[in-house]
Amino acid sequence: MRRIQLPEPPSPTARRGTPDIFESGVHTFVRRAVVIGNGSAASENQSVGLVRALGLADKHVLYRVTRPKGGINDWLQWLPVSLHKKIDYIVRMIQGYSQLMLKSQEKKLMPLPSENGVSAGLLAVLEADAKQIVSFARETYEKEGPLLVVACGRDTISTASSIKRLASENVFVVQIQHPRSILNRFDMVIAPKHDYYPLTPEGQKKIPRFLRSWITPRDPPDSHVVLTMGALHQVDFSSIRSAAATWHDEFSNVPRPLLVVNVGGPTRNCRYGVDLAKQLAVSLLSVLASCGSVRISFSERTPQKVSSIIVKELGNNPKVYICDGQGPDLHMGHLAWADSFVVTADSVSMISEACSTGKPVYVMGVERCRWKFNEFHKSLREMGVVRPFTGSEDISESWSYPPLSDTADAAKKVHEALAARGWKLKV
């Protein structure tokens, strides 16, 4: 008769799989998230980046706050969303829109715009409705536990704060970017340090005394405000390693060193035009001798007059490849395979992503930035993370720095805040 070998008893120190309800109660686990976006790829990328860093990339739903567009609406973008929608409704009523048309404007399910680069795989985006999300959080709390809500951008403030007010026991609300006032409307606020530039001695000098009470923020950050150096995003060691494998065939034989140039577009606080385009073209021609190859990408904000000059000056050079925006998005491939970057100073997001690689980052056009964005660039230079692009650089000369890890750092703070509340993530 064969001996029966009984299994060894489990070690008292060994980690064992324990049902949630016995481990610490099902209601203490956060296992799903809602992202509230505003239609801006850059803003929604920050929210999705945080959710991804928390391990909930496959367990989130994207809602979007939408504004009326067309006609007079293009002049009302500065209004709060709720007021803007009321005015639009009144205008449509006056214009005699049919009831059928009004109902079609109130549909809750909308097709996902093709320009959204952070919602791949979603067939549709739900229109953000605070009451609907609150009902969802309450009705599913017993079975699924608390709901993490992550929002970013001015247009999402009202919706996110309403969710917190109506379902504070069932949700944890994170607002990315400074909401300007009444920060206790959220469980956590994540904002870049340069948002507090108005409170610095240098910032105070630039604000007339009679206007200081109107400029926000007015108070230093408190304990539930998490400060970052730049913008949150989805780029980290794991995503870069994955992109390196994905784009191996495309980039493995590209002559090195590879210089990737990311061109944004002028903003209210960083104005430029053909003058910067000409300066950039001249500087790139000056460093070509030290480059194996150069790849240039334009953003959706890049004016035609800017891209045309760069294409005219560099398009026929055999070392230069200019992305035409057709075909697959090469952005992650560029981040993974580039040896150095040149980025225009207008985009905090593009600069933050490049600086998360630890590779040399040169910035073009900083002198055209003002107010808090100038402070952002100054901080990066003082940290040794970026250098100005002058055209005298030797691109074959590499330098490094500790990569920015704002997204991971913010995710750690979310973990700590949830733990203080007796909750934890269940990934």
Image (cartoon, grey):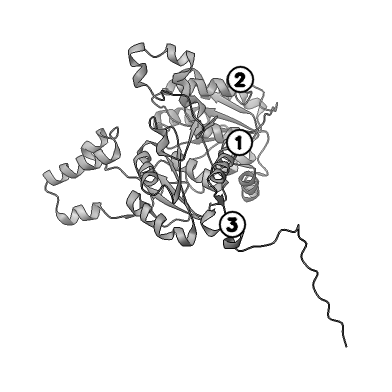
* Mark positioned earlier in the residue sequence (3 or 2): 3
Nearer mark to the viewer, of 3 and 1: 3
Q: Is residue 318 visible?
A: no
Q: Provide residue 275's location: percent of width, then percent of height.
A: 44, 20
Quarter of the image where one finds residue 341: top right
Residue to which mark 3 is pinned: 24
- Residue beneath disc 2: 382
Q: Which amino acid does label 3 sit on?
A: Ser
Q: Are marks 3 and 1 in contact (CB under 8 Å)?
A: no
Q: Is residue 380 visible?
A: yes
Check the image and report above or below for 90 versus 227. below
Rendered location of residue 294, percent (x, y): 59, 33
In the image, which disc is placed on residue 215? none
The numbered mark, 3 or 1, whose residue comes first in the sequence reads: 3
Residue under the image location 45 percent in, 34 percent down: 177
Give the CA distance from mark 1 to mark 2.
Answer: 17 Å
Q: SS class of the residue under badge 3?
A: loop
Name the mark on residue 405.
Answer: 1
Q: Label 3 crowding class (10 Å Cα cut-off): few <14, some 14-19, many 20+?
A: some
